């Protein structure tokens, strides 16, 4: 070779489509780029998951800067291939202020408002399900150890790569669907938790490809089979790091603030779907009796509730307060984790502001309740299409206000363009498209 090969570093953002996009630069310029970032444009945010710009509020106007976060680096150092190095960052205006449509800045703002008004710090963990087509597809392999055979190198590298990049693995398991797996990680502070979710998805995709397969986090890969969800676990601590989600005398063990937070989240659950389950295919998964969410209910150990109180071992030696957490289940990986978590925070904060009482904690299928009983408990169905979810968002003045006018306009325009691109396509065609892009 007559020249010396050079590696690049890619500076990225998780955008409105939940896609990680950015710009690369020579690795030798890294320190300069850490200070000055790279140029970006507003309309880049309107690229949908299929790589198309259907409409944009900004046209060709405007300039922004994508700046790296000091903790945003991911390095995949292979023995037999070039290093992959990317950095997560924030989109800012030219004067260095957070841009109103930057998803990461939106979450940072939500967490700051929660802290300022309540004194609460949020801990969270994103639990991911995904499909890996290089695994064997054998009858009867649900949760079977046999599902892990043949993909050991991929799994082992994934666990090592996560840990090497500051993400602590918790579990890895074969799931119910064909070639479906689940990976869980330890909780982290709110912004770091969302960063970990973005990093985990890209690391998993990169290693899946390295081992000859395609990883998809799409909500539905095989129509009629189990879909891929993202379950967002969360709890709260005070300034001293003490857990404050649990109160043994509270309903279901919920502290007063956690109870009001839960009530706010469920009150705005229909609008949240526009950002937490934001693809056309998402609503093939949100169906009754599919081990997914369908009703706006709080359940105790109920894996079909939108929000559930997670179990804690009934052992006197267990510190319940440290283990106690809630799980939001109406989410998937077609979304930016920053938008998902930011909206959950604002919905919960609204509940705390209004001092809402704890939702009734159900221990039965809401479908078995009468219409009147569900109405008395404030239980409705989640939206059954992306368009219905967008309408719910537009009809929720508080939810729109959390986004702000510019982000709300851009996001709704972005998603309606995505819907328009799929008109006339069959469900199977749509399923295939989302499988490819997520």
Image (cartoon, rainbow, N blue to C red):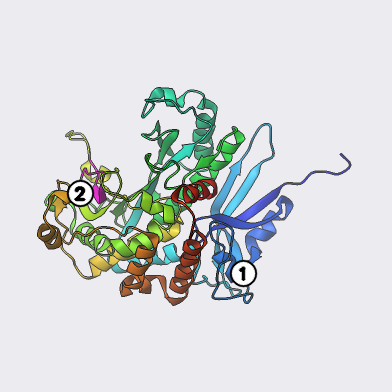
Distance CA(mark 1)–CA(mark 2): 43 Å
78 up-or-down from 71: above or below: above
**Residue ID at (33%, 52%):** 330
**Residue ID at (44%, 50%):** 427
Q: Residue 81 location in percent, x, y?
A: 69, 36
| Mark earlier in primary sequence (1, 2) | 1
Q: Is residue 95 magenta?
A: no
**Residue 41, numbered label:** 1
Q: Are marks 1 and 2 in contact (CB under 8 Å)?
A: no
Q: Is residue 306 magenta?
A: yes
Q: Which residues are magenta?
A: 299-311
The quadrant holding residue 356 is bottom left
Q: Which residue is mark 2?
A: 299
Question: Is residue 37 left or right of 17 when viewed as pictured?
Answer: right
Q: Residue 116 location in percent, x, y?
A: 33, 68
Secondary structure beneath dot 1 equals: loop
**Residue 399 shows up from this direction:** yes
**Residue 119 shows up from this direction:** no
């Amino acid at each position: 070779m007559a020249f010396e090969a050079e590696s690049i570093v890619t500076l990225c953002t998780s955008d409105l489509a939940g896609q990680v996009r950015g710009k690369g630069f020579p690795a030798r310029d890294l320190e300069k780029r850490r200070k000055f970032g790279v140029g970006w444009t507003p309309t880049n945010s309107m690229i949908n998951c299929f790589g198309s710009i259907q409409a944009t509020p900004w046209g060709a106007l405007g300039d922004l800067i994508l700046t790296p976060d000091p903790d945003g680096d991911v390095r995949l150092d292979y023995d037999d291939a070039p290093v992959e190095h990317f950095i997560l960052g924030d989109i800012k205006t030219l004067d260095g202020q957070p841009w109103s449509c930057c998803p990461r800045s939106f979450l940072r703002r939500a967490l700051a408002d929660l802290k300022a008004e309540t004194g609460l710090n949020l801990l969270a963990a994103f639990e991911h399900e995904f499909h890996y087509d290089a695994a064997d597809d054998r009858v009867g392999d649900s949760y079977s150890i046999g599902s892990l055979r043949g993909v050991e190198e991929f799994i082992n590298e994934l666990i090592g790569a996560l840990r090497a990049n500051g993400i602590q693995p918790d579990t890895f398991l074969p799931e119910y669907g064909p070639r479906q797996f689940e990976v869980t990680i330890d909780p982290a502070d709110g912004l770091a938790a969302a960063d970990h979710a973005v990093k985990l998805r890209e690391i998993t995709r990169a290693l899946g490809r390295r081992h000859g397969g395609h990883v998809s986090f799409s909500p539905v890969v095989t129509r009629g089979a189990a879909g891929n969800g993202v379950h967002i676990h969360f709890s709260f601590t005070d300034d001293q790091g003490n857990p404050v989600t649990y109160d043994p005398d509270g309903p279901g063990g919920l502290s007063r603030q956690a109870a009001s937070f839960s009530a706010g989240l469920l009150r705005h659950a229909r609008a949240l779907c526009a950002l937490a389950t934001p693809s056309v295919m998402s609503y093939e998964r949100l169906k009754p009796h599919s081990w997914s969410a369908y009703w706006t209910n709080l359940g105790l150990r109920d894996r079909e509730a939108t929000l559930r109180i997670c179990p804690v071992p009934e052992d006197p030696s267990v510190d319940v307060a440290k283990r106690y957490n809630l799980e939001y289940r109406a989410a998937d990986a077609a979304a930016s984790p920053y938008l998902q978590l930011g909206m959950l925070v604002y919905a919960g904060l609204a509940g705390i502001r209004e001092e809402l009482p704890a939702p009734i904690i159900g221990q039965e299928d809401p479908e078995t309740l009468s219409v009147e009983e569900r109405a008395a408990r404030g239980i409705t169905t989640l939206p059954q299409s992306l368009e219905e979810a967008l309408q719910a968002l537009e009809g929720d003045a508080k939810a729109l206000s959390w986004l702000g006018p510019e982000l709300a306009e851009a996001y709704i325009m972005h998603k309606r363009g995505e819907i328009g691109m799929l008109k006339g396509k069959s469900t199977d065609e749509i399923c295939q498209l989302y499988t490819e892009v997520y």
